[in-house]
């Protein structure tokens, strides 16, 4: 089928996006312009502490420098293409357009006790999970660290200014989840550069313990994260307790079957002593029987873990159904009886299809499109 989202794979060229630079790279750039050393740190503070939205607003910089920055660099590359809210403003989904025409999405979810942002790590995704709207798009391209970081900063800025308030007022983000479009471990270096950028205590200073990465189960990525320097939380999309079923739902299982996935998970837990989350999307009569719940309990028995049952968000054209509420409860009860911590994910933004990849894959009438930032 013709995919309207597919664009040629191009790297973001041209003037550098400041959010793509490390502090040493920014320092080198400014030095090459003959600027004093302290300028880089001053700009870094604008980017990640003050969250300054434009070069003009960096009023403590000389006008000539601001003009040169505006002419030769970019303060972000994402244009806001569409923004939708649900749950009385507590769920806000943004569709971004990249300079090459590809699209990304991010979701802000406000709760009484936390403000969570869910961001994309690739445009599209090459993993092909049958229940996922993003999977149907295929991989369009890897996105840069700056393109990941910029999604987060947009929401942080909006919360700070009050522009993105919902029913409860938050002035900062408390949690960051890499669960939007794409497979983070298929774009590991750029994803990790974004993690480090956001964590930088001299910059955005976001706690690693409040970040969660979700993977389809790329074993090398799990092993890498087990050795990483920052304690990021790990969520693993399991969705089935045996290879036959998992391979039917998630082609990646043929490359990294359950035994390999469990080995890597055990290594991760042993090295980090951190609890992993297993995500399990419940699909009616596919993976939601009590027998499969027993099999799942057997598989993860004794692991330091938690199971997150996810009501499936329907994807147009997918020959699947979400599990009935009673089947969800029965599945959960089996796990609880077996002593496995298990919660059902609170649904957010069903009206705006705020699940993975849903917005980008759903053509919308023109009137819901808000004006784009250039
Ligand atoms: N690629 C990573 C992270 C992005 S997907 C991964 O697969 O883990 C984030 C989560 O949303 C995954 O657990 C994924 O299985 C789930 N998901 C995908 N499509 C969904 C849908 N239509 N409804 C509910 N959850 C979905
Ligand atoms: Fe990719 Fe995750 Fe969707 Fe699977 S569920 S296709 S890995 S984004």
Image (cartoon, helix red, strand yellow):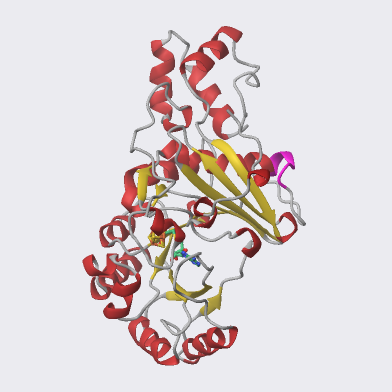
Residue 84 is situated, as x and y percent measured from the top left of the image, at 66, 50
Assess whether residue 160 is covered by the magenta stretch.
yes
At 40% from the left and 18% from the top, the residue drawn is: 29
Q: Could you say which quadrant of the image residue 193 lies in?
A: top left
At 54% from the left and 23% from the top, the residue drawn is: 43
Residue 172 in view (yes/no): no
**In the foreground, 135 or 234:** 135
**In the foreground, 303 or 86:** 86
**In the foreground, 237 or 80:** 80
Residue 142 is situated, as x and y percent measured from the top left of the image, at 36, 43
Residue 8 in view (yes/no): yes
Q: Looking at the image, is 332 positioned above or below residue 132? A: below
Span shown in magenta: 159-164
Residue 5 is situated, as x and y percent measured from the top left of the image, at 43, 46
At 48% from the left and 82% from the top, the residue drawn is: 284
Q: Looking at the image, is 361 positioned above or below residue 339? A: above
């Amino acid at each position: 089928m013709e995919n309207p989202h597919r664009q040629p794979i191009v790297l973001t060229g041209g003037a550098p996006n400041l959010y793509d630079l490390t502090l040493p790279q920014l320092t080198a750039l400014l030095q090459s312009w003959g600027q004093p050393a302290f300028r880089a740190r001053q700009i870094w503070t604008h980017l990640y502490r003050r969250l300054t939205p434009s070069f003009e607003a960096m009023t403590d910089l000389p006008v000539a420098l601001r003009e040169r920055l505006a002419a030769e660099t970019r303060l972000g590359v994402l244009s806001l293409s569409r923004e939708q809210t649900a749950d009385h403003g507590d769920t806000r989904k943004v569709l971004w357009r990249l300079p090459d025409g590809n699209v990304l999405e991010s979701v802000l979810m406000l709760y009484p006790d936390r403000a969570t942002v869910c961001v994309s790590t690739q445009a599209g995704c090459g993993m092909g999970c049958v229940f996922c709207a993003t999977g149907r798009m295929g991989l369009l391209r890897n996105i840069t660290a700056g393109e990941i970081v910029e999604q987060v900063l947009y929401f942080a800025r909006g919360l700070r200014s009050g522009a993105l308030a919902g029913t409860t007022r938050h002035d900062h983000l408390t949690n960051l989840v890499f669960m939007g479009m794409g497979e983070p471990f298929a774009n590991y270096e750029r994803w990790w550069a974004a993690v480090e950028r956001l964590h930088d205590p001299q910059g955005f200073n976001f706690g690693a313990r409040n970040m969660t990465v979700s993977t389809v189960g790329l074993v090398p990525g799990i092993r890498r994260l087990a050795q990483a320097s920052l304690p990021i939380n790990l969520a693993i999309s399991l969705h089935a307790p045996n290879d036959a079923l998992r391979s039917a739902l998630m082609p990646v299982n043929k490359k990294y079957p359950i035994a390999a996935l469990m080995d890597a998970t055990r290594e991760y837990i042993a090295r980090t002593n951190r609890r992993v989350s297993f995500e399990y999307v419940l699909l009616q009569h596919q993976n939601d029987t009590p027998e499969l719940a027993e099999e799942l309990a057997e598989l993860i028995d004794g692991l330091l873990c938690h199971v997150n049952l996810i009501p499936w968000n329907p994807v147009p054209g997918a020959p699947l159904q979400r599990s009935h509420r009673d089947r969800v409860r029965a599945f959960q009860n089996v796990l609880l009886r077996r002593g496995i911590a298990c919660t059902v994910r609170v649904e957010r933004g069903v009206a705006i299809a705020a699940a993975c990849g849903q917005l980008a894959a759903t053509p919308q009438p023109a009137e819901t499109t808000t004006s784009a930032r250039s």
